Image (cartoon, grey):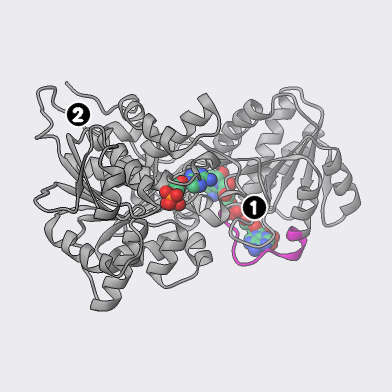
Amino acid sequence: MMRPLVSVEGARRVDARTREEYGVPELVLMEQAGMRLHEVFREVAGEDGPVVYVCGSGNNGGDAMVMARWAWLEGRRDVRLVLRARRFSEAGRVQARVLERLGVPVLVWEEEREEVRRVCREAGWVVEGVLGVGARGGLAEDVAELFRVVGESGARVFSVDVPGGVGCEGGVRADVTAMVGVGKWEVLVPAWREWAGELRVVPIGFPPEVVREEAEGWWLGPGDVGGLVGRVRAASHKGERGRVGVWAGSRGLAGAALLSARAAARTPAGLVYLCCDEEVYGLLGGLGGGVVVRPGDEGVRVDAAVVGPGWGRGEGRVGQLAAILGRCGRGVIDADGLEALARLRDGEGRLDLGGRWVLTPHPGECARLAGCTVEEVLGAPGRVCGELARGLGAVVVLKAHTTWVVAPSGRVWVYDGMCAPLGTGGAGDVLAGVIGGLLAHGVGVEEAACAGVVAHGEAGRRLFARRGWFGAEDLVGEVGTILKDLGVDYG
Ligand SMILES: NC(=O)C1=CN([C@@H]2O[C@H](COP(=O)(O)OP(=O)(O)OC[C@H]3O[C@@H](n4cnc5c(N)ncnc54)[C@H](OP(=O)(O)O)[C@@H]3O)[C@@H](O)[C@H]2O)[C@@H](O)CC1
Ligand SMILES: Nc1ncnc2c1ncn2[C@@H]1O[C@H](COP(=O)(O)OP(=O)(O)O)[C@@H](O)[C@H]1O
């Protein structure tokens, strides 16, 4: 089942509803969170120490104090507690009292700054529980200074729930972030993703229906692909499994067309046509293999189109795109196809793709389409892509180190890519081909976009693990294997 994502505000509602509607006491939730967080921390940090638990005055600090208690009870004596101040939430006060009675050494940031600097410098790990989902507005100066001390200490940082100050200048940079109960989508925003490090989610017993009701998006993973695509009939033949038309390539950019077409051919779709310009036909004509290469597109009838990889930006592209939109029911528009789309829309004033097309912009292309800056795209992908998706009636796939799939309905899916080797020339062409192949095969538009993104990302991860740095042509070779391994089977 797809994992829900909530916003920081949604997480506050999940907390509140769990307590108020289900009667789960705050101390119970805190104990469960702290114990689970401690288990994850033990797994990632092992015996490395000393460990400094830096705790704020809210419940995020309370979670970190529960973690410190469990470490102490298990016999660790290289544990230090740093309190931001002698101020606590109600549940946090209980934790602080227990720790004091156990004899855990405590420092207070407000009163002993030099001493805090020293213990942080000596630490192997800092557990940061200063700010969680209760943080509001810009960082208070004392917290910003505390985060600087943590950042400069050289210790590795384990953040509780969200990296403290996520979304603010001066927030903490964590090596590991263990989110409490449910994933927080702010952490996956491209502009902030690097602040969180490795991501974990610890279950603490929030009622699943509350989480589902408050979900504002879904976190895609490898386990989702099989269900999104479904099984293929063993008795099916190529004519039944979908025809893809690829309109791509131009002088100097013919390789992009081959990458897309070959990737599409490695999906369950049965036939792939590459419709290229006369001037590159001489080059591409003999290279298709299983792909049928045509000079132009006369008589080509397809179930889905892939438009744009390496297409060039000639004047004629806008009219060509309009014709393709008219004759193909669904498809993917990528790269130079997106530039043509922007010009078509600007010329017509309005364009409605009827929810049947997928747009796959990288952040620069997305900014051009949305009429904003790349920074806005990376900082607010849900809003920017949501407006674009609604405005054009298309599913928008924002391709970055985390990839956001946003539907015209406002539904959002996020894939946590974080795989630098995938940022290689032509990788986007491969993705367009995969999504186009799935669309031609009859997979739903949102489903094809999501499954394509995950399969593509997992192919990248797997290739890097097996063979190191790779090129886009290697990625093409992996498409068929990854789809099968992620559950796209026949029978
Ligand atoms: N409730 C529950 O049942 C559960 C809660 N859980 C856990 O609690 C966390 C949420 O706890 P929360 O709501 O207490 O807020 P939290 O993130 O600790 O921060 C609030 C404190 O921060 C401060 N502060 C605020 N803004 C600031 C700023 N800009 N700059 C500087 N400081 C600022 C402000 O302190 P003040 O300055 O007012 O003294 C305030 O007291 C959640 O992330 C999860 O870890 C889980 O265990 C599950 C069960
Ligand atoms: N650091 C990264 N981690 C994960 N995926 C990445 C990273 N950098 C780029 N990608 C992915 O690589 C692909 C690059 O696509 P694109 O920019 O269109 O390349 P091209 O135009 O060369 O084909 C996208 O799917 C993007 O999400």
Q: Is residue 207 above or below residue 44?
A: below
Percent of width and height locating residue 259: 35, 41
Q: Quadrant of the C terminus?
A: top left
Q: Residue extending furthest front?
A: 282
Q: What residue is shown with label 2?
A: 231
Question: Foreground mark, 2 or 1?
Answer: 2
Does the segment drawn in magenta span residue 139? Answer: yes
Percent of width and height locating residue 246: 24, 48
Question: Closer to the N terminus: mark 2 or mark 1?
Answer: 1
* Real-space CA distance between mark 2 and mark 1, rounded to the nearest whole angstrom: 43 Å
* Residue range highlighted in magenta: 133-144
- Residue placed at 83% from the left, 57% from the top? 110
Q: Nearer the viewer, residue 98 or 473?
A: 473
Q: Secondary structure at mark 2?
A: loop
Q: Nearer the viewer, residue 96 or 83?
A: 83
Does the segment drawn in magenta span residue 155? Answer: no
Please state which amino acid type lies under the numbered disc 2: Arg
- Residue placed at 34% from the left, 28% from the top? 486
Q: Is residue 410 above or below residue 281?
A: below
Taking the image as shown, residue 436 lies to the left or right of residue 61, namely left
Taking the image as shown, residue 66 lies to the left or right of residue 304, namely right
Q: Secondary structure at mark 1?
A: loop
Q: Which mark is residue 60?
A: none
Mark 2: few, some, or many residues within 10 Å (few <14, many ≥20)?
Answer: some
Main SS class of the magenta portion in the image: loop
Q: What residue is shown with label 1?
A: 164
